[in-house]
Image (tube, coloured by chain):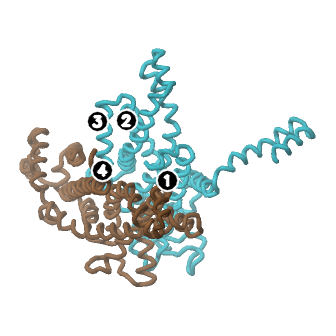
Chain colours: A cyan, B brown
């Protein structure tokens, strides 16, 4: 139907207007396949990114400036709450809205940096293993399996105990935690790719390993890696919040959702919002990220589903 | 085994790479003689390879040093805290297996209905929530609002319920989805059609023919989930002040009790290796096809 009407439009109004009509149609068609919950999730993640960058301008208060006169204030819709602290304050008078907005920073920063570290390490290991096979493959995969079957969170706790808590330690640890998943997925893809005609043909024409890796393998890994990053992001954000909850993550008084939830644990009876406000932010973020990840995986590579 | 070796070596490397562990063990203003004495006592004046071998031989004989805070052998301390964690983990595991199989079967059989869709959506939500926040929400509603169960501590069965449910919910969410998809896959198979065709009752088809074959992929994932469940226990213990090894580790880190941290890592790793081995064995028992490979 729409095709006919655009054709009629073209006939009646000429080429310029036809172009104008076509553009919104095309974009709508492109979005048509995307389910509503994915659009919402993308909007949430986008908003989160904006908030993380613009936190100093968006937050109504300084996140590490306690207001001792306004402690344990409830959110504005409850009795005793005010719009000065829209989501209430905690036990030392920190503004919860401001701290929750700032809390998106460590979550996204650590999640993304760790994903990049995991991606670089894992892709390098996976390409080496899948391309060269043999002893290299066995060693790398043995290491990956060994790490996957180890209690990584407990090891991370021990490492932080020795090195002290800092954001850098946290994101390097999270990145190291993520490499085996990348390595396994990339390796499987490379093993399949290296037997494909275009790689075999390129080799027959005398191409070296470096050329094949850069020209033929890496471009074909791009989508896989994008999907993997989205899927891993969920676990990495949770990793940060776990450790911060245990008091081993982002050093205080810098706000992090995990440590904020932990701080409110003692005050659940009197001031439940201290834990629940950052908790909702965390759950919302993780749900949005994992919905996008699952959807991308199903759309781009259904064979990954069971990995 | 390889895992164990790698973890022990990693712990050794991290401990040594940060410089002198004696500096971590003693207060900062300790006199020099004391530092030298402790260094000799711990064998830190020897070359690194000798230290590595000594470290291993002591670890194998169960001697992981003495807790700085409790002045007890670290191994003893950890083993004493292992039982509460195992208790919590096992009950949570049973709960999650029973509930996820039930939920998985029910949703698979009612596929496409509103009930199925609501269940699947809430399972995804549950799967994405961090365990400690689920624990907090449970405390808020069950302990604070309703006052049914204690919010923290240990000692009675009532104390065990909330932490066990919290740990179980996370595992249940992913397992139930898996049971559902595995069952849907199997229900399309020829032998299920045959079973139906020969007039078998629907419940017999589902339980005897479908569920049994659907259990294979589930058991594979069960191993991974059991490991994740143990990690989840570590975090949930802190929420509910449950006296297990996760809490011990977190407390030990807070007071810089390194021998205890080290002992926790080794014990948890051993448990992980044993679990993985048990899963491999149970896989062989369940699937006759694997036995002859």
| Residue farthest toward the bottom in the current orientation of the protein | B147
| Residue denoted by label 2 | A125
Numbered circle sitting on residue A185: none
Q: Residue at x 57, y 62 (%)?
A: A60
Establish whether labels 2 and 4 are both on one chain.
yes
| Residue denoted by label 1 | A105
Q: Report whether A48 appears left or right of A66.
A: right
- CA gap, disc 2 to disc 1? 30 Å
Looking at marks 1 and 3 on the same chain, the residue that comes earlier in the sequence is marked by: 1
Give the letter of the chain under mark 4.
A
Alpha-carbon neighbours of circle 2 within 10 Å: few (<14), some, or many (≥20)?
many
Establish whether labels 4 and 3 are both on one chain.
yes
| Residue denoted by label 3 | A139
Establish whether labels 4 and 1 are both on one chain.
yes
- CA gap, disc 1 to disc 3? 37 Å
| Residue farthest toward the top in the current orientation of the protein | A206
- Return the x and y of residue A69 as percentages of the image width and height: 49, 74
Give the letter of the chain under mark 1.
A
Give the letter of the chain under mark 2.
A
Q: Quadrant of residue B153?
A: bottom left
């Amino acid at each position: 139907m729409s095709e006919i009407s655009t054709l009629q439009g073209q006939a009646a109004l000429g080429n310029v207007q036809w172009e104008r009509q076509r553009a919104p149609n095309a974009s709508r068609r492109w979005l048509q396949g995307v389910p509503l919950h994915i659009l919402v999730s993308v909007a949430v993640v986008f908003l989160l990114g904006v908030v993380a960058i613009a936190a100093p301008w968006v937050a109504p208060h300084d996140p590490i400036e306690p207001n001792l006169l306004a402690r344990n204030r409830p959110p504005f819709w409850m009795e005793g709450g005010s719009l000065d602290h829209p989501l209430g304050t905690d036990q030392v008078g920190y503004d919860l809205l401001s701290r929750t907005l700032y809390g998106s920073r460590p979550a996204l920063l650590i999640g993304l940096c760790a994903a990049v570290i995991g991606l670089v390490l894992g892709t390098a290991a996976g390409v080496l293993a899948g391309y060269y096979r043999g002893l290299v493959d066995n060693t790398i995969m043995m290491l990956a399996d060994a790490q996957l079957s180890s209690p990584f969170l407990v090891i991370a706790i021990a490492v932080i105990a020795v090195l002290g808590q800092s954001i850098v330690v946290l994101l390097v640890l999270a990145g190291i935690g993520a490499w085996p998943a990348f390595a396994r997925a990339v390796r499987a893809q490379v093993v399949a790719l290296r037997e494909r005609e275009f790689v075999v043909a390129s080799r027959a024409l005398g191409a070296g390993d470096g050329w094949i890796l850069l020209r033929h393998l890496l471009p074909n890994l791009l989508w896989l890696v994008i999907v993997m990053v989205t899927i891993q992001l969920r676990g990495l954000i949770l990793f940060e919040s776990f450790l911060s909850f245990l008091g081993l993550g982002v050093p205080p008084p810098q706000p992090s959702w995990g440590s904020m939830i932990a701080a409110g644990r003692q005050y659940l009876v009197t001031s439940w919002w201290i834990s629940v406000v950052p908790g909702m932010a965390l759950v919302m973020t993780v749900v949005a990220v994992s919905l996008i990840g699952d959807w991308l995986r199903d759309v781009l590579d259904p064979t990954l589903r069971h990995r | 085994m390889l895992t164990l070796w790698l973890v022990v070596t990693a712990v050794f490397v991290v401990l040594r790479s940060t410089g002198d562990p004696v500096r971590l063990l003693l207060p900062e203003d300790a006199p020099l003689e004391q530092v030298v004495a402790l260094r000799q006592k711990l064998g830190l004046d020897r070359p690194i390879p000798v230290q590595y071998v000594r470290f291993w031989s002591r670890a194998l004989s169960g001697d992981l040093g003495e807790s700085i805070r409790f002045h007890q052998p670290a191994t003893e301390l950890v083993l004493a805290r292992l039982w509460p964690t195992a208790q919590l983990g096992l009950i949570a595991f049973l709960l999650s297996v029973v509930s996820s199989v039930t939920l998985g079967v029910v949703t698979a059989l009612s596929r496409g209905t509103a009930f199925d869709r609501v269940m699947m959506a809430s399972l995804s939500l549950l799967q994405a929530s961090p365990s400690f926040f689920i624990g907090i929400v449970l405390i808020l509603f069950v302990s604070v609002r309703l006052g049914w169960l204690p919010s923290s501590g240990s000692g009675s069965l009532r104390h065990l319920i909330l932490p066990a449910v919290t740990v179980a919910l996370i595992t249940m969410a992913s397992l139930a989805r898996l049971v559902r998809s595995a069952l849907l896959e199997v229900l399309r198979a020829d032998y299920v059609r045959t079973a139906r065709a020969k007039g078998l009752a629907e419940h017999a088809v589902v339980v005897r023919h479908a569920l049994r074959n659907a259990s294979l992929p589930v058991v594979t994932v069960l191993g991974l989930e059991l490991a994740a469940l143990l990690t989840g226990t570590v975090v949930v213990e802190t929420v509910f002040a449950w006296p297990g090894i996760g809490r011990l580790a977190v407390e030990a880190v807070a007071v810089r009790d390194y021998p205890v941290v080290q002992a926790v890592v080794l014990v948890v790793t051993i448990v992980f290796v044993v679990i993985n081995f048990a899963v491999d064995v149970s896989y062989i028992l369940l699937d006759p096809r694997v036995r002859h490979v």
